[in-house]
Amino acid sequence: MNNIILKTVQELSEWRLNNQKNISFVPTMGNLHLGHKELIREAKKSNENLILLSIFINPLQFNNKEDLINYPRTINKDIDLAFSAGADAIFIPYEHEIFPKNEKEIKYQKASEDLSKTLCGIYRKGHFDGVCTVVYRLIDIIKPEVIFLGEKDWQQILIIKEMVAKQNIKIEIKSINTQRDIDGVPFSSRNNLLLKSDREKLKLFSSELLHNKQIFNQTKYIDLKKIIKKLTDKDIKIEYLEHVNAFNLKRSTSEMNITMLAGAIICGNTRLIDHVFLMRRDPIIAIDGPAGSGKSTVTKLIAKNLKFIFLDTGAMYRALSWYLLKEKINYENRNELKTFLSNVSIIFKSVEGSKQNVIINNHNVTEKIRTQEISSIVSSIASIKEVREFLVKEQRKIGASGGIVAEGRDIGSKVFPNAELKIFLTATINERAKRRKNELEAMGNGTIDFDKLKNEIEQRDFDDSNRKISPLIKAEDAIEIISDGYTIDQVVEKILGIYFETIPKELLLKNK
Ligand code: PAF
């Protein structure tokens, strides 16, 4: 079954028909290097799919004829490398197969304007439209389950992701971090066009970026002017050098967490790009949703998997409610409440497994806060302005250096609006009532009346969604997951999958 070379769309379709397996797709323009090899390896590692690599030099993405003519072509070496790395088939189509004369088959794509009006997009007019058009066409022909792309072309990845979402294409996009040679230079097909002196310049450029990443890790600051001067003094021709948000590519501000220092230089006739990712704090995952959506269990498992702190904000509101009751505080009296709050401390203590205890002023209330008595008052206590302000401040303190999965009702919208990943986890009311009933009965609460419980949950939803302060809402940029019909593990896997697809691999790897 190995070593299949396909040259036409017809051959490809027949091969697809004969092998009823999902496809992991690695698109390339040939002149394969160790970066591509790593993509194939990663594709092989991640599932049981057949791996199809394409080699197609896409004329639409060259805004310069010379560049297209000079683009390195090494087809025999490429075939050897792809098969030896583990590809099952290679698609090497003729140009008329991808762009047939009958233009009706080609759906020309327009790259996201916001994402392509910056960095490389400024200097390569039409380039990203060309990339989108060919990637769309290849996906349409191949119908892969997953596509593998290199993060060296991060702007390209963002643009392809945007196109895939806009066109509603069902495909996973997986990426690998920039692969570098021993001298720090990223692998790129265009490196073959460099003279020795040019390679030296590229090396200086890349090492300057890597050096500034180290500086940033300590100072949290990038001095663009200084870097540009340093490089220009070394006779390096910079096309651009920018410090931008890694997801929307807007100029970086101090509020942004994950950013990138990205640039392009010109060596002879060759244009080369490189970048490093920068991160002020570790990532934050915000999981919001109504009662009984399963978010506590899911959040706990995600935190365990990522070795992140698990922040159960609901438990904080419950603990405070319990303490207010215990101390018989008249919380309608705002002065009394404020004085009381100034002496409250809530901490989470990890115990065995993924469990943690909730301690409020030395009282271990882990179990006590799960009673129906607390459930019935927590929503109204959580709607008191002073309570919310106090707890939001405490939550932000816990999350200050990131590395946290927080669950609640206003995490993505209020507590951590800059969270890297926001999930709105919900389930239908029947499903949630069913789960809560099982949970309460398992805790030894006797037989629970389903309809009564359902009404209580409905009331709680209404209170949470309609309170004036921090109501339960889905943050604009949150991804909604309806968990009916899914097991906990499936929901966890889905969220982790989205997380790994969102955060650049360079930042996920240890010893960053
Ligand atoms: O990154 C590349 O090599 C190309 O832009 C791609 C994705 C193969 C499309 O031609």
Image: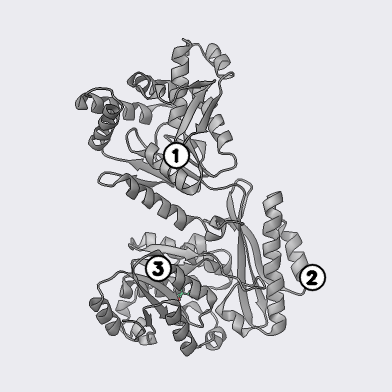
Q: Marks 3 and 1: which is nearer the front?
A: 1
Mark 2: secondary structure: helix
Dot 1 crowding, Cα within 10 Å, few <14, some 14–19, many 20+: some
Q: Which image quarter: residue 448?
A: top left
Residue found 24% across the figure and 72% down from its top? 20
Which residue in the protein does label 3 denote?
Answer: 147
Location of mark 2 (residue): 233
Separation of residues labelled 3 and 2 (CA atoms)? 41 Å
| Circle 1 SS class | loop
The residue under label 3 is which amino acid type? Answer: Ile
Mark 2: amino acid: Asp
The answer to whether one can see residue 252 in this image is yes
Q: Say which amino acid is labelled 1.
A: Ser
Provide residue 255's location: percent of width, then percent of height.
60, 45
Tell me how far mark 3 sits from mark 1, CA to CA.
Answer: 34 Å
Q: Quadrant of the N terminus?
A: bottom left
- Using the image, determine if residue 347 lies above or below residue 303: above
The answer to which of 314 and 476 lies nearer the viewer is 314
Q: Which residue is mark 1?
A: 354
Q: Residue at x 20, y 26 (%)?
A: 451
Q: For the residues labelled 3 and 1, say whether their Cβ atoms are less than 8 Å apart.
A: no
Which numbered disc, 2 or 1, marks the residue that appears first in the sequence?
Answer: 2
Residue 176 placement (x, y as % from top left): 50, 65
